[in-house]
Image: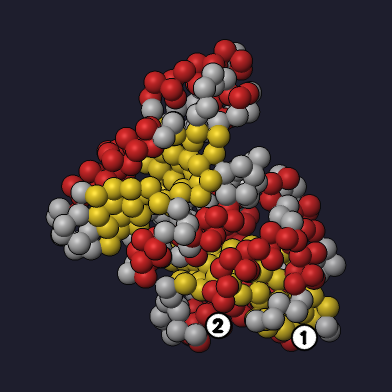
């Protein structure tokens, strides 16, 4: 087996994606942008990296990561790091023959990954799976800690339009019909002409839901996101009488449309324009020949009101997991012990807050 860590400019990374089903979260430029994203690297000091492995049987493995310095406040006497996948569903990917030996290939690749991380001073890695791109789970379970979370909501765009409408809950159908009767319209903008109004809607939504500061993306972040991802990113805008009611950013990769970020203005919040908005994007995505619209789950992976809103559009659910790897158990144990000394209580197990030494004291 051949294994190496590669950067965003590596042709190996791009060639792997050209042969694989993937999502925009795996794109080198998105990973590079996410390395300065406060959701992944609070101090904006992350480094984009990917681990690649292949064998003589044509199997290949790729995991995109952001490597972050462990803050001195965590108690490290030497420079140590940990890793996390970019914001979203940047699952590990595997391509090649899918026979019974794929698990053994992945087991070896994950061992090499763990050893390689440790040799670089990287203590742990936190990895999110992708609900719509299959990946064998047993090797992950054996190599680390696999944690099951709330399901996410998917829409199967290959079924007839009538079936999509049948799966829409009555509590969504009536507001959708009423919104269209009252003049709400939705357009997909290639020129992003209403970006400023979308940005206002997104910011107002984050304030309204009491989101943490890290979710208040700057205007420049969205511009850089568009530049990094290019034409696979779309801005959808819902208006009434020329005024923007809500908007959202969607990606379109490998037949998968991802509901990435959205917001509703305070002015129109009580009229629920987001329902007719999602229904219109669903129709647009289907007409373009995509196979799946992934709406995601609730806040923090819970079945909350956001999850219930999304669940009203489809009966299809997909499991979502996170995988936690402790690549340097000795260093991880020391950091956890120092956290316990500061906090005066026991650290979370790996299945809980991870890495435990980054938990608020």
Q: Say how the picture is coloured.
A: secondary structure
Quadrant (top left/top right/bottom left/bottom right) for the C terminus:
top right
Identify the secondary structure beneath mark 2: helix
Q: Earlier in the sequence, mark 2 or mark 1?
A: 1
> In this orientation, does residue 269 appear?
no
Q: Is residue 274 above or below residue 163?
A: above
In the image, residue 66 above or below residue 228: above
- 94 on left or right of 161: left
Label 2 Cα neighbours within 10 Å, binned few <14 / some 14-19 / many ≥20: few
Instruction: Specify whether 119 is left or right of 211.
Output: left
Seen at 53% across and 67% down, the residue is: 258
Q: In front here: 130 or 13? A: 13
The correct choice, above or below, for 347 with respect to 218 in the image is above
Q: Quickly name the residue at label 2.
A: 283
Secondary structure of the residue carrying tag 1 is loop
Q: Position of residue 162 (x, y in %)?
A: 48, 85
Q: Residue 235, position in %: x, y?
A: 66, 74
Q: Nearer the viewer, residue 311 or 265?
A: 265
Left or right of residue 30, residue 241 in this image? right
Name the residue nearer the viewer: 60 or 297. Answer: 60
Q: Which residue is found at the position 20% from the left and 54% from the top? A: 55
Q: Residue at x 55, y 34 (%)?
A: 69
Is 136 above or below relative to 188? above
Instruction: Say which quarter of the image contains residue 342.
Output: top right
Numbered circle sitting on residue 159: none
Given contact means CB atoms under 8 Å apart, are the residues at marks 2 and 1 in contact?
no
Q: Which mark is residue 183?
A: 1
**Residue 278 in view of the camera:** yes
Crowd rating for badge 1 (residues with CA inside 10 Å; few <14, some 14–19, many 20+): few
Real-space Cα separation, disc 2 to disc 1, in angstroms = 18 Å
Residue 56: image location, x then y, percent: 16, 57
């Amino acid at each position: 087996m051949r294994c190496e860590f590669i950067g965003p400019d590596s042709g190996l990374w791009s060639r792997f994606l050209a042969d694989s089903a993937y999502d925009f979260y795996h794109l080198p430029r998105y990973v590079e942008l996410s390395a300065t994203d406060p959701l992944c690297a609070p101090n904006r000091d992350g480094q984009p990296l990917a681990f690649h492995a292949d064998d003589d049987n044509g199997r290949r493995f790729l995991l995109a990561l952001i490597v972050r310095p462990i803050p001195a406040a965590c108690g490290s006497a030497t420079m140590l790091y940990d890793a996390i996948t970019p914001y979203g569903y940047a699952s590990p990917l595997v391509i090649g023959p899918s026979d019974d030996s794929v698990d053994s290939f992945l087991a070896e690749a994950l061992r090499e990954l763990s050893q390689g991380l440790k040799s670089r001073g990287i203590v742990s890695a936190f990895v999110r799976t992708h609900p719509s791109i299959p990946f064998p789970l047993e090797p992950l379970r054996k190599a680390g800690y696999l944690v099951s979370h709330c399901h996410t909501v998917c829409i199967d765009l290959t079924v007839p339009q009538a079936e999509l409408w049948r799966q829409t809950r009555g509590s969504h159908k009536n507001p959708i019909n009423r919104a269209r009767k009252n003049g709400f319209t939705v357009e997909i903008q290639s020129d992003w002409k209403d970006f400023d109004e979308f940005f206002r809607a997104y910011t107002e939504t984050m304030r309204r839901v009491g989101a943490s500061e890290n979710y208040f993306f700057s205007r420049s972040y969205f511009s850089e996101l568009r530049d990094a991802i290019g034409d696979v990113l779309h801005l959808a805008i819902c208006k009434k009488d020329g005024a923007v009611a809500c908007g959202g950013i969607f990606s379109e990769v490998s037949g998968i449309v991802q509901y990435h970020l959205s917001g509703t203005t305070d002015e129109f919040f009580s009229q629920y324009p987001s329902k007719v908005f999602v229904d219109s994007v669903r129709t647009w995505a289907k007409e373009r020949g995509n196979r799946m619209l992934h709406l995601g789950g609730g806040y923090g992976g819970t079945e909350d009101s956001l999850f219930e809103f999304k669940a009203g559009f489809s009966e299809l659910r997909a499991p979502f997991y996170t995988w936690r790897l402790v690549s340097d158990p000795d260093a991880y144990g020391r950091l956890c012990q120092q956290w316990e000394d500061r906090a005066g209580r026991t650290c979370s197990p790996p299945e809980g807050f991870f890495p435990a030494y980054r938990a608020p004291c």
